[in-house]
Image: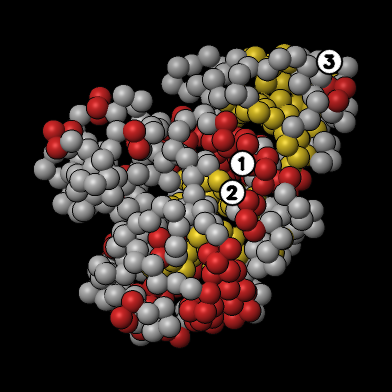
Amino acid sequence: MSLRQLSIASLLLFTISLQASPPPLQIGENGRYLVEPDGSAFIWIGDTAWELFHKLDREQALHYLDDRAAKGFTVVQAVVLAELNGLRVPNAYGDLPLHDLDPTRPNEAYFQHVDFIVDEAEKRGLYIGMLPTWGDKVPSSNPGAGPIVFNPENASRFGAFLGDRYKSDPIIWILGGDREVMNQNVKKTWDAMGRSLKASSEGKQLLTYHPRGNETSATWFSDSDWLDFHMYQIGHEPRTANLHRLLGKSRQSQPVKPVVDGEPAYEDIPVRFWNYLDFSTPTRAPEHVLDENGYIVKPEYFRDGFITPHDVRIHAYWDFLGGAAGHTYGHNAVWQMYRPGDPIALPTLRDWRSALDRPAAAQMIHLRSLWEKRPLEKLVPGGDFIASSPPKHSIWAHSDDDSYALVYLPDGGAVAIDTSALAMPSFTASWYNPSTGQSAAIGSFTQSQSPTFTAPATSAYPDWLLVLDSSRADYPDL
């Protein structure tokens, strides 16, 4: 427990089990993964809780953190100067983050609440992916509530303040906030903030940049000395080719850096919502589409439907098997911590508390379990061990020592394996269910065989992961 936590410990209304503080992270030797001190890959399973510091009180924040820790999340992404009018609308205790909208005059009372959440996250084994500010506080071609308050000089001072305050905490710094870099002066502002964060935190913490949808930090910051890994955002559409394009662009950028999907298609968000909403109106959607609480009661208005748990799992497995170092989950109600009667950022189907238990959120723990039993740091995307045309949207990868290989089939089907392309004299095969975390053994095989594997046929569980383990590897069952 930190010294500042002692002053507020009496406010806790329940006792939690202490976990080991998350260790400092670094970049792995091959430049592709974030790793812990022992060299094993850090498993980034993030959640976008953008309004966590701004809207939740301490009891609510504890409820949220307990839930995400229990569901296997490892990173909580939250914004200090929040998107939803975070400079003018105070937090749950009536405090604004800045005095007179001045980044060089932070409000200590506001930051004590941020301190509380950072410390409580640490006790639950969670990293905070901390955004110093949402991107609308910096000039861009996509203005938001703002106001614009940053320039290179005060961005450097604000970065120094944050870096010094949180340099001993399990923080991963995420600059940006859903914005492109409009011009060189804007880039200078982000560069100034990034360099001051790196210096004031004494290089103990990793930094990245969260871009606008369908973009990657590699577009602007490939050679920036403060940026340790790349981040991309795919936009809120299902099965989008943008994921593969942005992941590929980020991985091909030089010098080589790890890549994380920092904002996926959110569970329960209307697909291509921007085609149906009028952001000049308070309700965004026509009033007959919403009830008195602001919930969507006419889902058919959104003719493209909503992002499903299946869509969420597809993006998660595409990320990791495509070579990403991490995946971030998101929910349409949770990112904005929506409560009945709140100003509407995007219309939702439910409130943030009930949204915590949506199916795909609970299924992230199965993704984490997979990487706790197979070394992610050895994973190499692709490989020529697929013997014939695989089912559409499938993706595969193998370990650099050929101790295991994976094939993800989003819609089931059959896949033929060319065992001559795998250095596995003998191996076992099994099916892993991304929805339930259960596995089923298929059998043992030798390199002289080239089997075809057909996923279990069930409408309840459309997607399956084929796991091939070398007999010499002695991996635990999934």
Residue that label 3 marks: 449
Residue at position x 84%, y 28% from top? Answer: 422
- What amino acid is found at the position of numbered circle 1 in the picture? Leu
- What amino acid is found at the position of numbered circle 3 in the picture? Gln
- Give how far apart the Cα atoms at labels 2 and 1 are: 6 Å
- Tag nearer the camera, 1 or 3: 1
The quarter of the picture where the C terminus appears is top right
Which badge, 1 or 3, comes first in the chain's sequence? 1
Residue that label 1 marks: 246
Of 282 and 36, which appears nearest the observer?
282
Of 281 and 461, which appears nearest the observer?
281
Residue that label 2 marks: 216
Left-right relation of 463 to 88: right
With respect to residue 115, does 39 lie above or below?
above
Q: Position of residue 58 (x, y in %)?
A: 30, 68
Residue at position x 38%, y 56% from top? Answer: 143
Which badge, 2 or 3, comes first in the chain's sequence? 2
Q: Are marks 2 and 1 in contact (CB under 8 Å)?
A: yes
Q: Position of residue 133 (x, y in %)?
A: 44, 66
Sort mark 1 into few (<14), some (14-19) or many (20+) by Cα contacts within 10 Å: many
With respect to residue 67, does 165 lie above or below?
below
Left-right relation of 420 to 339: right
Instruction: Give residue 188's quadrant in the image.
Output: bottom right
Of 239 and 185, which appears nearest the observer?
185
